[in-house]
Amino acid sequence: MEALKDIRILDMTHVQAGPTCSQLLAWMGADVIKLEPPQGDATRGQLRDIASADSLYFTMLNCNKRSITVNMKTAEGKQVFVDLLKKCDIIMENFGPGVLDRFGFTWEKLHEINPRVVMGSIKGFGSSGPYADFKAYENVAQAMGGSMSTTGVPNGRPFVTGAQIGDSGTGLHLAIGLLAALHQRDRTGQGQYVEVAMMDGIMNLCRVKFRDHQRLQRGPLPEYSVPTHKGMGAVPRAGNDSGGGQLGNAIRCKPGGTNDFIYIVVQEAVWDALARRIGPEVGMPNLATEPRFATIENRRRYQNDMWEIIGEFALRHDKRELMGILNELDVPCGPIMSTEDLANDEHVRLREMYVELDHPQRGKWMNVGMPIKLSASPAKIERSPLLGEHTDEVLKSVLGYDDARIASMKQAGAFSAPAKAPKKEKAA
């Protein structure tokens, strides 16, 4: 049985952060009804690679959902919304500040209509504080949440991360909050408002940087390859330093292409074996007893020298070969995997993390799989819905509307955009 089989979600979210959350919950069995405006989620048309098909941006974030179009600017559309709200356990939105309020649906009103409903809300900076009304974007949130200031090369410009920690990361945080609120509702009978701000989520993901921020008040950070000192105002950008108690770095391998690198963590426990393996091959048979690297403190002090020696060894091997050598020595490591590497990786396919789906518009395509593995209720991934594909189905099976009522509401424009008035011809 699916873990969330009895949970129904009214999903008004769009773009990435909210749909990430609702897709994960759908993969765990929740009935997610994606309520879209008549023109649909904006990402259906963004970055299209096939002119007549929903974009990969949309299809990869909206699997296992049902789509219903509702025109919330009509009285009939608002009634459909209210009726659905009464039938759902969760309502989700990531509109700009005040959008639902202007439709007449504050949290207090929603709670009055259905006291058991849990509301999930994603905002850039939350609903309180000086930044509450500011617009956010993935990279804006990364900039303001502490990620960019600590990502990149020393003394260089800050970088955003390739991982979507602002959007998808916030969606993950919201999923945790919603499940906690459902658990509490089962005890109290009352729903609650669950809010996650993108900036807040990124700060949580940057937790270890705030650890180091406070350590700087007491002394330098010896694990960093760049100079630090007591009283330094902010944690620096440190390239590919591991940022932890053990030294780590990305080392170039042969043949020297863009992604011919391997990330290596030199734990204290593995240095001796690693040095004995590397030393003879690079002309340093006594590397294991070299005073510069004899202790973890010395290896931190002379880490740039250590990485240069390891780098000379790495250039004699490709990244896959080197991964095999290092794993035999219990050295934590991982080749830098490109999207092409991962798309063709046996381990990834075995764990169903890159799965093939079929779509009526685009045909066969690939999606990233479910990262949460439940032994008793494994996820079954299904394609994303076409715009409004399940409108009649939801109206009948969830709300109990009959054909006559549905026809009448369609006539009133409850599910479609208003017809444009014909342009008046200019007089000759």
Image (spheres, grey):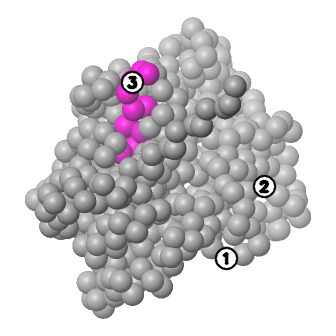
**400 left or right, relative to 215:** left
Q: How many marks?
A: 3
Query: Relative to 318, is 261 above or below?
Result: below
Quarter assignment of residue 349: top left
Circle 2 SS class = loop
- Asked if the magenta segment contains residue 53, the reply would be yes
Separation of residues labelled 2 and 1 (CA atoms): 27 Å
Taking depth in this image into account, of 30 and 246 the one nearest to the observer is 30
Mark 2 or 1: in front is: 1
Quarter assignment of residue 271: top right
Numbered badge on residue 234: none
Which residue is rendered at x = 37% and y = 63% of the image?
Answer: 77
* Extreme-left residue of the structure: 1
Separation of residues labelled 2 and 3 (CA atoms): 48 Å
Q: In which quarter of the image is the N terminus?
A: bottom left
Q: Label 1, on which residue?
A: 128
Give the residue type at disc 1.
Ser
Q: Label 2, on which residue?
A: 235
Give the residue type at disc 3.
Ser
Numbered badge on residue 52: 3
Give the residue type at disc 2.
Val
